């Protein structure tokens, strides 16, 4: 489940702007989303969603992330990475804060089970694909209950065209709409891969505002 409490923690980290401090006394801070992998014995390599390759020199705490983890990080640049490094990278960085994004698998449903995962609306801010992940940035209203967010593949709702149809679903568990929250949730796309193909065209849809208002977006997953 995508726990509301986790979303609040993530919101706290993501409340900073991309460039956090431009004073002369403090290093320039940046905020990015990326994909993390181990590099060497104790360092990590992070490829940001903008394609910048970062190597970590210092971390704020002991972390134990698996390879290919989807992360949000706040950092400042220490120096450019030498061209003769064993891996092509852009910068060595000092990481001030890092957290793993809520990462979920696509849920397979049919016409009789799809509504059980919720039909509550959200306000979509951005939907995009990075490597093997589809990420959704959105706002929603809630109070004290746990909210669940899923990306579903309806076996009964696939067309005969070239697209794979996916639906973002929000289960608010009849929560009160007391406060607005911002959130990122990311979904693994690996399960959609097909033998002999190098890309999949995705039609993304999700309910926002009211019963008849849906966001729809066509994306391409290349692998």
Image (tube, grey):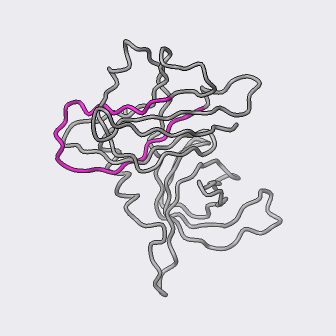
Position of the N terminus, as image quadrant, is: top left
Q: Relative to the observer, which residue lies in front, 105 or 136?
A: 136
Question: Taking 91 as reference, is 116 above or below it?
Answer: above
Question: Taking 114 as reference, is 205 above or below it?
Answer: below
Give the magenta-colored segment's residue range: 166-189
Image coordinates of residue 16 in percent, x first then y, are 40, 65
Q: Relative to the observer, which residue lies in front, 43 or 210?
A: 210
Q: Relative to the observer, which residue lies in front, 117 or 23?
A: 117
Figure quadrant of residue 159: top right
Question: Taking 68 as reference, is 110 above or below it?
Answer: above
> How many numbered marks appear?
0
Image coordinates of residue 130 in percent, x first then y, are 60, 46
Image coordinates of residue 198 in percent, x first then y, are 73, 33
Position of the C terminus, as image quadrant, is: top right
Please report the residue visible at 52 percent of the width from the left and 66 percent of the height from the top. Answer: 75
Image coordinates of residue 12 in percent, x first then y, are 34, 57
């Amino acid at each position: 489940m995508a726990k509301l409490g986790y979303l609040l923690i993530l919101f706290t980290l993501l409340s900073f702007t991309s460039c956090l401090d431009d004073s002369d006394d403090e290093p320039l801070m940046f905020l990015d989303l990326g994909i993390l992998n181990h590099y060497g014995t104790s360092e990590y390599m992070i490829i940001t969603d903008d394609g910048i390759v970062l190597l970590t020199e210092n971390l704020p705490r002991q972390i134990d992330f698996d390879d290919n983890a989807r992360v949000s990080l706040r950092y400042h640049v220490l120096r450019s990475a030498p061209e003769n490094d064993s891996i092509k990278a852009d910068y060595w960085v000092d990481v001030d804060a890092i957290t793993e994004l809520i990462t979920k698998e696509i849920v397979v449903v049919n016409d009789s089970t799809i509504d059980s995962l919720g039909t509550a609306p959200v306000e979509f801010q951005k939907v995009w694909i990075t490597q093997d992940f589809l990420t959704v940035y959105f706002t929603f209203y809630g109070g004290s209950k746990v909210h669940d967010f899923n990306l579903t593949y309806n076996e009964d709702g696939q067309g005969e065209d070239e697209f794979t149809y996916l639906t973002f679903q929000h289960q608010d568990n009849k929560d009160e709409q007391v406060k607005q929250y911002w959130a990122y949730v990311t979904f693994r796309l690996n399960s959609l891969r097909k033998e002999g193909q190098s890309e999949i065209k995705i039609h993304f849809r999700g309910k926002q505002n009211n019963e008849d208002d849906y966001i729809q977006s066509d994306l391409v997953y290349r692998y």
